[in-house]
Image (cartoon, rainbow, N blue to C red):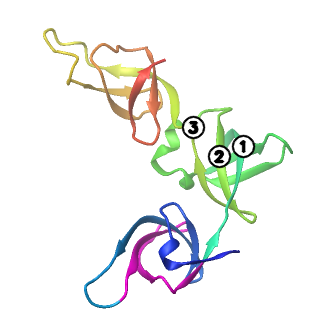
Amino acid sequence: MPKINGNEIRPGNVLEHDGGLWAAVKVSHVKPGKGGAFAQVELKNLRDGRKLNERFRSEDKVERVRLDQKDQQFLYETDGKLVFMDSETFEQTELDAELLGDRRPFLQDGMTATIEYYGEEALSVALPQKVTCTVAETEPVVKGQTAANSYKPAILDNGVRIMIPPFVGEGEAIVVNTELFEYSERA
């Protein structure tokens, strides 16, 4: 694994630090009036989700880790485990449903997700940025409401609550952004 200097750390880099794998979330470079410059880095543990704020001077060396990404197809869920299949080797992988967190309801049968591996260990699952869902329940349109700034609450077919524009009704298919949990467009 390549070693990089402390001032070369960028957001999104995965580092081996203190015996764990950490992703750099925020990086700010600080040049105090007295003393040497350093990078103030907010790190997130990829295994258990802990956060850590660490300072790295430019002469500090850290291990940068490369993660392997594989596109795999979601098959089914059983006992809190998600089963994915590699579309090239047809090998099946079981992962904890907790890896997805609150994005779990957006995972649909047959959907292709990107799984990041460190060796044989799966660390994260990334869903497609946009997913098509159906509006299961929403309020009727209030007359006189302008479409410019007003949104109304809705419950999707997967149980997720989001805000949608007033012109979208029940039973309509919409595209939802899975990162921001918001309405994107009509399907």
Which amino acid type is shown beneath numbered disc 1?
Gln
Task: Give the residue number, with chain letter if any, for mark 3.
Answer: 128
Asked whether disc 1 touches disc 2, contact meaning CB atoms under 8 Å apart, the reply is: yes
The percent position of residue 108, horizontal first and vertical second, equals 60, 33
- Disc 1 from disc 3: Cα separation: 12 Å
25 or 140: which is nearer to us? 25
Which amino acid type is shown beneath numbered disc 3?
Pro
- Disc 1 from disc 2: Cα separation: 6 Å
Picture layout, residue 151 above or below residue 123: above
- Number of numbered labels in the structure image: 3
Quarter of the picture holding the N terminus: bottom right
Q: Is residue 39 magenta?
A: yes
Image: magenta residue range: 36-62
Please give left or right for residue 136 compared with residue 130 in the image. left
84 or 144: which is nearer to us? 144
Picture layout, residue 40 above or below residue 80: below
- Give me the residue at 47% from left, 38% from top: 178
First reached walking from the N terminus: tag 1 or tag 3: 1
The percent position of residue 176, horizontal first and vertical second, equals 45, 30
First reached walking from the N terminus: tag 3 or tag 2: 2
Q: Secondary structure at mark 3?
A: loop
Asked whether disc 3 touches disc 2, contact meaning CB atoms under 8 Å apart, the reply is: no
Residue sitting farthest toward the bottom: 35
Residue sitting farthest toward the right: 89
Task: Give the residue number, with chain letter if any, for mark 1.
Answer: 72
Q: Badge 2 local density, few (<14 within 10 Å), some, or many (20+)?
A: some
Please give left or right for residue 161 compared with residue 178 in the image. left
- Give me the residue at 65% from left, 32% from top: 109
Q: Is residue 37 magenta?
A: yes
Q: Secondary structure at mark 2?
A: strand
95 or 68: which is nearer to us? 68
Task: Give the residue number, with chain letter if any, for mark 2.
Answer: 114
